[in-house]
Image (cartoon, coloured by chain):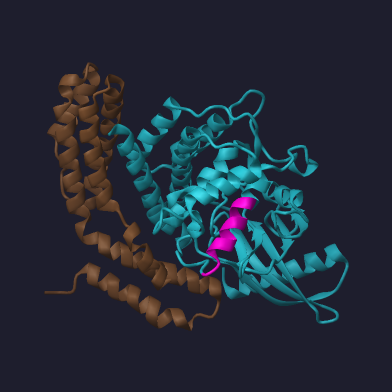
Chain colours: A cyan, B brown
Amino acid sequence: MTLIEEEKLGLEFLTYYSELTNKKYTLKEINRVFGGASKETYKVKLFDIDKEEVKLIYRRSQESSLIETDQLTEYSAYLAFQDSSVPVPKTIAIEETPDKLGAPFIIMEELEGLAASPFDSSAYAPFEEALGKKFWKILADITLKDLSDPALTNIDGPKDNEKPWKRELDHWVKVINSDSMGVEPILEAAIRHLYKKPPQDSSRKCLVHGDYRNGNFLTEGEEITGILDWEMAHIGDPLEDLAWALSPIWSWEDYSKPAYLIDREEALKIRSYSSQIEINEEDLSWWELFSCVKGLAIWISAGHEFISGDNTDPINLFSAWIPGDIHTEIILNTLEKELN
Amino acid sequence: MKPDINTALIFSAQEITTRFLPLIKEEYDQSRLGSWGGLMLIASLQLDSAADNLYKENNQMSLWLQSKLYNINDENLKRKIQDVTSKKPEDIKISTLDKYNQTLRALFVEVQIIMEDLEEVSSLKESWVILREMHGHRKISPLLTLLQNKS
């Protein structure tokens, strides 16, 4: 998108927002945020008539997106956690059709704080300890979310007797089969392993963020100011988010400190104590291997978007090359161990 | 000797990241261009060995598949393995070697499944040694730090 097109997008947004709030604003600036190929995210700054600055986040669906996700899922999750112990941005509006601004979108207030790269090992220094405790406690709070909250009505989950693990595994295998551009024996072996040795059915279902990890939260010093990117939220197994957040991919240079925060053992203790859910190690191992398959599905999908020309954002090429490589190696390490 | 493609790509990537990147004001465009520079650098480092790696992988998979023929009852699969492994790619273009590599990979998976069913642990271990080596050929995660510094 050229700067002129971006400016046009900003002015269209300004008109929409002024009508929505029935107030007059002027556009100060609109800037696209890099990363996260599933949505185009813009930071928009407006001035109201008193010259007070209004900072907003404008998230538009892309024509082609990494993983097909609808805006309603993310918006519903944000709604469910307004003014709670799980910090999320204040929701303002959702448009599920392209009628108003050419694509479905959501608008939220911009939160203070910075999002780090999940591959930056020193991103949280020197606040790893404080942030780590909060990160794993917030995960427990998400797990404890009351599923009868009306805001969660639009969030998908297992139907009837459908098993959460099977629903998720089937879903991501389908993505792999649809988008894969080659045969990956290591990935295939992992999928076979997961189907052969499923986890126990969890006694309870919970809200799953779907992409709970470093890089998807904002920090300001030792505070976590926002948990973001809920577009893959669903109802599922309490171990799913935990395993995803623990994955060595998010602490590639130091496995012992998941998400480059605190030690794995301490993280598990906090999560277990705060959620009052005991962790079955074997089941957790299943979900950790599943995380690699899910990750690879996402990275394969990114590569497909790139090679098909649908979305040549370099983030897609990066995803296919680097995280894809790392998740493959984690599977390799895991399955080799099983064999020996 | 004329400059090779690898060197040209490395210098292009360096020029992008050191000369042009600082000129861009928009954060999004800056990150995007920085990523291209880093990815180009990775591509340049992979390019030289790509054909050789595929050639080695194809040989390793062919040998393993042939060595498992005695354990396969499915006559169609046996014939297919014999057929594929007896033919060699027509040329050594990366695309040709890769196409052959994909055919071998599909057979490799089929035979791995048979070995799993038969609980042929030693054959499976051999197969994982090959997969480890193949993964090593494509492994670019150590370049992550490099990419981060460039972008």
Q: Position of residue A328 (x, y in %)?
A: 36, 46
Q: Determine the image quadrant of residue B73.
A: top left
Residue A48 shows in the view: yes
Q: Is residue A114 left or right of residue A300?
A: right
Extreme residue toward the right, this view: A22
Give the overall secondary structure of the magenta segment: helix
- Horizontally, residue B64 falls left or right of residue A179, namely left
Left or right: residue A259 versus residue A57 is left
Q: Looking at the rendering, in which quadrant would you find the C terminus of chain B?
A: bottom left
Quadrant in the picture for residue A23:
bottom right
Q: Residue at x 50, y 63 (%)?
A: A117
Q: Is residue A132 magenta?
A: yes
Image coords of residue B99 (percent x, y): 26, 43
| A264 over A279 or under it: above or below | below
Q: Position of residue A302 (x, y in %)?
A: 47, 51
Residue A246 higher or lower than A317, as above or below? above
Would residue A214 appear left or right of A152 to someone viewing this image? left
Residue A210: tell me if it is visible.
no
Residue A121 part of the magenta segment: no
Q: Position of residue A219 (x, y in %)?
A: 61, 66
Question: Hey, which quadrant is residue B110 in on the image?
Answer: top left
| Residue A3 against residue A37 in the figure, above or below | below
Residue extent of the magenta highlight: A126-137
Q: Residue at x 19, y 30 (%)?
A: B65
Q: Nearer the viewer, residue A42 or B120?
A: B120
Residue at 80% x, 79% y is: A52
Quadrant location of the N terminus of chain B in the rendered image? bottom left
Q: Is residue A298 above or below residue B77?
A: below
Report the front residue among B135 and A7: B135
